[in-house]
Image: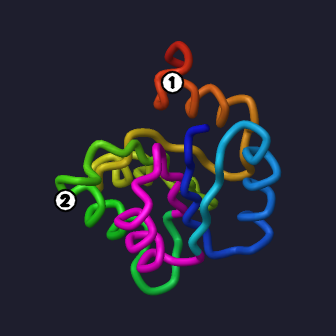
Amino acid sequence: MKRILIVEDLEFNRDLLIQLLEDTYEVLTAPDGASGIALAEREHPDLIIMDLSLPGIDGWEATRRIKADATLAHIPIIALSSHAMRGDEDKARQAGCDDYLSKPLDENLLFDKLRHLLGEGPTP
């Protein structure tokens, strides 16, 4: 079973993602950027869903640090943003994110992107 790390500070959003994913994937969670980086270093998940607005180390910086680590750089990261401001997707991709989703989350689009990035299906 593939492992997905969810880095999300809001418990409600983490719980929602866990409920969506737990039947298909092993789910790991972190409530902030620093613990997300540490968990990625320790567990080497198959994919990371990274909220961009995190306390302390934000999602952009956490992504940059993960992608700068040669042992972690291959892990696909999907940025997740509730702001959906113009330029956020470009900024997330420049930080190293492989894809981008805005909240509220489209469940079908999420699974399409997961399958694609995990090599389980066609490009969404």
- Under tag 2, what secondary structure? helix
Residue 41: image location, x then y, percent: 35, 65
Check residue 116 in the rendering and tell me which mark sits there, or answer none. Answer: 1
Q: Give residue 62's quadrant in the image.
A: bottom left
Image: 11 above or below 13: below
**Is residue 6 magenta-colored?**
no
Taking the image as shown, residue 7 lies to the left or right of residue 24, namely left
Q: What number is the disc on residue 68?
A: 2
Q: Secondary structure at mark 1?
A: helix
- Residue at image point 40% right, 42% down: 76
Q: Is residue 6 above or below residue 110?
A: below
Where residue 12 appears, x then y in whole percent?
Answer: 80, 69
Residue most toward the top?
A: 122
Name the residue rendered at 47%, 22% in the picture: 119
Q: Which residue is rendered at x = 50% and y = 17% of the image?
A: 123
Segment tinted magenta in the rendering: 31-51
Residue 45 lies, with reference to residue 33, above or below; the image says: above
* Amino acid type, residue under disc 1 in the picture: His
Q: Residue sitting at 37 percent across and 48 percent down? A: 97
Three-letter residue code for mark 2? Ala
**In the rendered image, the vertical position of residue 7 relative to residue 93, given as above or below:** below
Q: Which mark is residue 94?
A: none
